[in-house]
């Protein structure tokens, strides 16, 4: 275990955890994203007199969403969802499927913002956007805290907090390592032994 200082408190974290994005870096970037997204939300209201429906993807996106939504000055509607991504064979072709678990997800005619912690390949976000459009959403945009830079991304979110090119596992600020350490206020990468 190593000692890490986050926001004035000292925590014991595994020695393999290396800070990638500090709480201060996250707070500053979330404030910037909140200002950009807030301006867009105001334009949506001015044009349609409907609020943007913000859809946080649980459980990983809860920390990012909570901080982000409080940086948006206009009113928004909040409808959390939980997704399950799985592979299903259709005529011998493997396709990404997303099952959406939500109460009261009525998106017909609405402008929607999906909020998640991480975009790797983007297949889940892409499938979620497609599902929401099929349910009648007028427009679907997305924001993620971290976008992993891959050679062949299938989906690029509208707003991105940070970009990262490595393949290391993230933990903290809602992301977990075997359901542990979600509550760290910063984002760490896990250095695996060679």
Image (tube, rainbow, N blue to C red):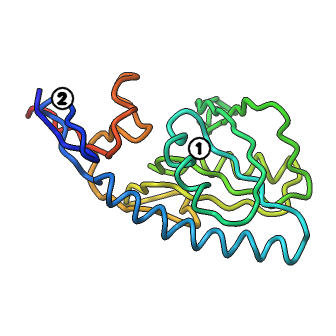
**What residue is rendered at 39% in x and 33% in y?**
183
**What residue is rendered at 59% in x and 33% in y?**
85
Could you tell me which quadrant the N terminus lies in? top left
Question: Of all residues shown, which one is farthest toward the left?
Answer: 194
Q: Is residue 50 above or below residue 4?
A: below
* CA neighbours of label 1 inside 10 A, class few (<14), some (14 to 19), many (20+): many
Q: Is residue 153 above or below residue 169?
A: below
Residue under label 1? 124
Residue 80 image offset from top left, x and y in percent: 69, 39
Give the number of the disc on residue 12.
2
Comparing 91 with 58, the one in front is: 58
N-term mark: 2 or 1: 2
Give the number of the disc on residue 172.
none
State the SS at label 1: helix
Question: Of all residues shown, which one is farthest toward the front?
Answer: 8
State the SS at label 2: strand
Residue 92 image offset from top left, x and y in percent: 62, 32
Q: Quadrant of residue 21?
A: bottom left
Residue 90 image offset from top left, x and y in percent: 69, 33
Q: Quadrant of residue 17?
A: top left
Residue 65 image offset from top left, x and y in percent: 57, 48
Pair 2/1: label in front: 2
* CA neighbours of label 2 inside 10 A, class few (<14), some (14 to 19), many (20+): few
Comparing 85 with 37, the one in front is: 37
Q: Is residue 80 above or below residue 44?
A: above
**What residue is rendered at 87% in x and 77% in y?**
47
**What residue is rendered at 32% in x and 46% in y?**
187
């Amino acid at each position: 275990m190593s000692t890490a200082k986050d926001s004035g408190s000292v925590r014991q974290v595994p020695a393999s955890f290396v800070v990638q994005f500090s709480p201060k870096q996250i707070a500053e970037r979330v404030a910037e994203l909140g200002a950009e997204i807030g301006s867009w939300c105001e334009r949506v209201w001015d044009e349609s007199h409907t609020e943007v429906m913000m859809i946080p993807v649980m459980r990983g996106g809860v920390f990012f969403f909570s901080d982000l939504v409080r940086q948006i000055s206009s009113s928004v509607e909040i409808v959390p969802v939980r997704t399950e991504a799985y592979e299903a064979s259709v005529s011998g072709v493997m396709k990404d499927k997303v099952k959406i678990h939500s109460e009261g997800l009525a998106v017909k005619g609405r402008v929607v913002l999906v909020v998640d912690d991480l975009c790797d390949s983007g297949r889940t976000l892409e499938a979620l956007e497609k599902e929401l459009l099929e349910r009648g959403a007028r427009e679907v945009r997305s924001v993620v805290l971290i976008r992993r830079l891959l050679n062949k991304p299938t989906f690029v979110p509208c707003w991105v907090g940070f970009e990262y090119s490595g393949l290391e596992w993230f933990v903290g600020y809602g992301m977990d390592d075997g359901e542990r350490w979600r509550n760290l206020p910063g984002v760490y990468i896990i250095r695996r032994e060679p």
